[in-house]
């Protein structure tokens, strides 16, 4: 089975219920031929997951577009709601000092 594509799969449970022996394969599909030539044995490199900078940039670009579209669609509603909530009752309020006798106010 592909190592990272088997989330939630437990080899012991499959072996117990179905009688099959689970052999966890390499992380990347391009390593499968070497895995088979090696007698279905993984090397340390076959089990390692890397996340180099080109892949990180690709993921950032892939996520930036849908998130920015979502934000642009929500912004008009959010800004109207925010402005409406922040100005409720503010137009009639004026700052006046409290008038208490004996505190310097007539």
Image (cartoon, grey):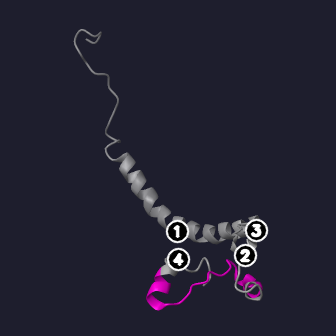
Q: Which mark is residue 50?
A: none
Front-lying residue, 64 or 72: 64
| Residue at numbered disc 1 | 70
Helix, strand or loop at label 2? It is helix
**For discs 3 and 2, the disc positioned in front in the rendered view:** 2
Helix, strand or loop at label 1? It is helix
Q: Position of residue 85 (x, y in %)?
A: 36, 50
Q: Is residue 76 magenta?
A: no
CA gap between label 3 and label 4 equals 26 Å
Q: Which mark is residue 46?
A: 2
Q: Position of residue 17 (x, y in %)?
A: 44, 88
What residue is drawn where x is 22% and y is 12%? 101
| Residue at numbered disc 3 | 54
Helix, strand or loop at label 4? It is loop
**For discs 4 and 2, the disc positioned in front in the rendered view:** 2
Q: Is residue 15 magenta?
A: yes
| Residue at numbered disc 4 | 7
CA gap between label 3 and label 1 equals 25 Å
CA gap between label 3 and label 2 equals 20 Å
**Who comes first in sequence, dot 3 or dot 1?**
3
**Who comes first in sequence, dot 1 or dot 2?**
2
Front-lying residue, 54 or 72: 54
Residue count near mark 3 (Cα–Cα under 10 Å), binned few <14, some 14–19, many ≥20: few
Q: Are marks 1 and 2 in contact (CB under 8 Å)?
A: no
What residue is drawn where x is 56% and y is 67%? 67
Q: Are marks 4 and 1 in contact (CB under 8 Å)?
A: no
Q: How many marks?
A: 4
Front-lying residue, 48 or 105: 48
Residue count near mark 4 (Cα–Cα under 10 Å), binned few <14, some 14–19, many ≥20: few
CA gap between label 1 and label 2 equals 38 Å
Instruction: Report the magenta residues as a range.
Output: 13-34
């Amino acid at each position: 089975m592909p190592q990272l594509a088997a989330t939630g799969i437990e080899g012991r449970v499959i072996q117990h219920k179905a009688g099959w022996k689970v052999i966890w394969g390499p992380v990347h599909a391009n390593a499968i031929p070497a895995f088979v030539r090696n007698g279905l044995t993984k090397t340390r490199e076959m089990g390692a997951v890397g996340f180099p900078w080109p892949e990180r940039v690709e993921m950032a670009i892939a996520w930036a577009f849908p998130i920015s579209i979502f934000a642009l669609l929500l912004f008009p509603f959010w800004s109207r709601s925010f402005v409406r909530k922040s100005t409720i009752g503010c137009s009639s309020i004026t700052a006046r000092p409290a008038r208490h006798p004996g505190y310097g106010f007539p």
